[in-house]
Image (tube, rainbow, N blue to C red):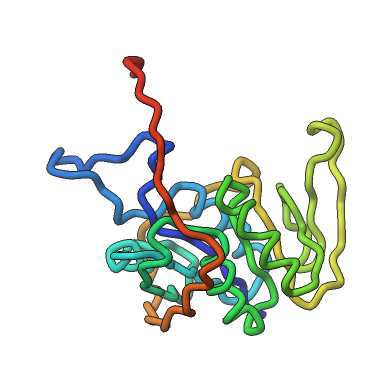
Amino acid sequence: MKVLVGVKRVVDYNVKVRVKTDASCVDIASVKPATLNTVTAAIQCGGDVHLLVAGQGADAAARAASNIAGVAKVIHVEGEHFAHGLAESMAAQILSIASSYSHILFPATASGKNIAPRVAATLDVGQISDITKVNAADTFERPIYAGNAIATLQSLDAIKVITVRTTGFDAALGTGGTATVEVLGAVADSGKSVFVGSEIAKSDRP
C-alpha cells in the first residue's frame, strides 16, 4: 500500500508571504503548513508516503519536502505549466502515476478541493471529503451538518481520493526526514486552461 500527497509549489498571492529570518528575500522554498497536517493523515492510512511536488523552480521545495518526517519519497516534477498550480495540469500529472497508489490525499484548501474532484472523476471513484480522522485504511470520519455530527464512512474503491481537514490532524515534523527525491518527467500541458493574471487587493491594514 502506498499513499500519495499532492503538493503544488507556486507563490500564493492570496496569503501573507513568509520572509527569511535575515529579511533578505521571500522564502518560497518551504512547503505550506497544510501539507504537514496532510502528511500525518497519510501516515495513518498506512504504507509508504510519497509527496508529489510540482511547480516551476521547485528544486528547493522538493529538498525541503524530503526533510518532512514520515515521508519515504518526494517526486519532483518541473514544468512551466505548473507555475500557477492550475488544477487541470496538476490533476493530469497526478493521474499519470495514480495507478501506483492506494490513497491520494490533498489538503482541503482551495487548491486541493479544486484538484481532487478532477482526479476522482477521471478515476471513476467517489471522493472522500474533509476527513478529520483515519479509523482504518478504508474507514474515515468527517463532520456533517455544519459540524454538529460526525459521519463514519467506508470506501470500497481501489484508489481512495481524499481531502483532509487539516485542523483534524497534528502537523508532521518538518525536519528529521530522510526521503529520497525522484525527478519525474512532466506530462504535457493539456491546454485546457491558461493563467491570465491576478488582481491583488491592497489594504493599509496589517
Nearer to the camera, 15 or 130: 15
Q: Is residue 14 above or below residue 28?
A: above
Q: Residue at x 46, y 47 (%)?
A: 33
Q: Residue at x 44, y 54 (%)?
A: 195
| Apparent side of residue 44 relative to residue 150 in the rendered image (left or right) | left
Q: Is residue 106 above or below residue 201?
A: below
Q: Residue at x 36, y 73 (%)?
A: 78
Nearer to the camera, 36 or 198: 198
| Apparent side of residue 199 relative to residue 28 in the rendered image (left or right) | right
Query: Looking at the image, which residue sits at the far top?
Result: 204
Where residue 165 appears, as percent x and y from the top left, is 65, 46
Q: Residue at x 65, y 62 (%)?
A: 44
Point out the image quarter for the N terminus: bottom right
Point out the image quarter for the C terminus: top left
Count the numbered circles shown.
Answer: 0
Where residue 77 appears, as percent x and y from the top left, is 40, 74
The image quadrant that residue 18 belongs to is top left
The image quadrant that residue 144 belongs to is top right
| Apparent side of residue 186 relative to residue 128 in the rendered image (left or right) | left
The image quadrant that residue 105 belongs to is bottom right
Where residue 59 appears, as percent x and y from the top left, is 29, 68
Where residue 23 appears, as percent x and y from the top left, is 15, 38
Nearer to the camera, 120 or 159: 120
Nearer to the camera, 81 or 91: 81
